[in-house]
């Protein structure tokens, strides 16, 4: 069985790492370059850097900070936020990223996923799915097709979670894979920052239908939550921010506890 990955996430706003609750009420969590170096030393399997206001502000990723951060890490490094074109991807990879995360542009222009996967390889392309639970009665059935006999669904939100769409998150995840995504980064907007646990049903449904790795995001408050995302949500990796940024857990501690519970990890 492949080892499960533990991935700290740097949400960056105005040059600083921040952490909010359900995409609002951000508080400062340090310098991204310093945090990256610490996670590299801690034994993180990968690191994710998300410029969370780039799409809202209609600008590109802060590549100067990406470059300085990349110089501190010797593990796979994913960068997202403001990725709108093949040229943006090339520039981000040249700045030191190993992978790019596509969110808003993937919804607006799905062809970008296939073009970038063909140009740079599937392994470089992570498609982010920011999903929020909504009552099914609010859906646009003419756009999404027949609705399953369920009361709840998950709809994709773009622009850092600020703009709702009528795109079904489960369908979008599958489409992204078909277009060439190498991984899916699935974030529950409802759980984000709450530290109450991941949305296991959302994760399980996407993981069971996906033939590519799924990264769980949104809601980690302790190691039990991570265990549930891997064992019940059937994910290949867990992403967390608050519990690492504020030194409540070290990456090593999380890995040791997961290993003791039978989860294969790289110690």
Image (cartoon, grey):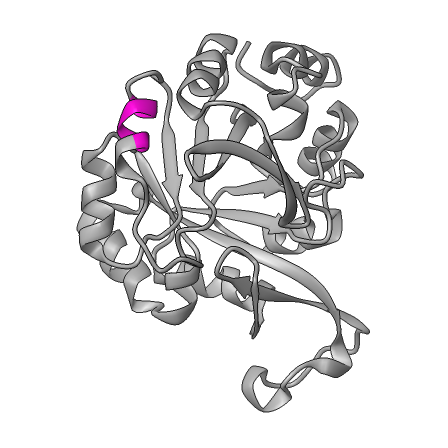
Which of the 4 quarters of the picture holds residue 68? top left
Q: Is residue 111 magenta?
A: no
For the N terminus, the image quarter is: top right
Q: In the picture shown, does residue 138 fall above or below 196? A: below
Instruction: Point out residue 3 in the picture as x, y percentages from the top left corner.
Output: 53, 23
Confirm whether residue 227 shows in the render: yes
Query: For the image shown, how many numbered marks are present on the structure?
Result: 0
In the rendered image, residue 69 lying in the magenta stretch gets the answer yes
Horizontal arrangement in the rendering, residue 191 relative to residue 88 (left or right): right
Residue 1 seen in the current view: no
Looking at the picture, does residue 17 appear above or below residue 56?
Answer: above
Which residue is drawn at the image coordinates 27% and 37% (left, top)? 63
Residue 34, percent across and down? 44, 16
Question: For the magenta stretch, what is the residue range?
Answer: 65-70
Q: Which residue is depicted at the point 61% across and 41% down?
A: 217
Would residue 28 appear left or right of 133 to someone viewing this image? Answer: left
Comparing 255 with 209, the one in front is 255
Give residue 24's position: percent from left, percent from top: 64, 49
**Image point (57%, 49%), residue name:** 186
């Amino acid at each position: 069985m492949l080892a499960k990955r533990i991935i700290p996430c740097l949400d960056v706003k105005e040059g600083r790492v921040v952490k909010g609750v359900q995409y609002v009420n951000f508080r400062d969590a340090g310098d991204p370059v310093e945090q990256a170096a610490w996670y590299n030393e801690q034994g993180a399997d990968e690191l994710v850097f998300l410029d969370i206001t780039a799409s809202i502000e209609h600008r590109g990723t802060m590549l100067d900070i990406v470059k300085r951060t990349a110089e501190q890490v010797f593990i796979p490094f994913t960068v997202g936020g403001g990725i709108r074109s093949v040229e943006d991807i090339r520039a981000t990879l040249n700045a030191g990223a190993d992978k790019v995360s596509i969110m808003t542009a993937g919804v607006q222009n799905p062809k970008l996923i296939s073009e970038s996967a063909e140009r740079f390889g599937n392994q470089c392309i992570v498609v982010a799915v920011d999903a929020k639970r909504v009552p099914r009665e609010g859906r646009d059935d003419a756009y999404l097709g027949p609705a399953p006999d369920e009361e709840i669904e998950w709809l994709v939100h773009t622009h850092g979670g600020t703009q709702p769409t009528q795109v079904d998150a489960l369908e979008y995840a599958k489409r992204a894979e078909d277009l060439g995504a190498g991984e899916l980064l699935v974030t529950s907007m409802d759980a984000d920052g709450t530290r109450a646990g991941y949305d296991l049903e959302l994760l399980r449904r996407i993981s069971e239908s996906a033939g590519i790795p799924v990264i769980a995001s949104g809601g980690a408050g302790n190691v039990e939550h991570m265990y549930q995302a891997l064992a019940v949500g059937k994910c290949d990796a867990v992403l967390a921010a608050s519990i690492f940024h504020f030194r409540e857990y070290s990456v090593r501690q999380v890995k040791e506890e997961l290993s003791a519970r039978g989860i294969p990890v790289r110690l």
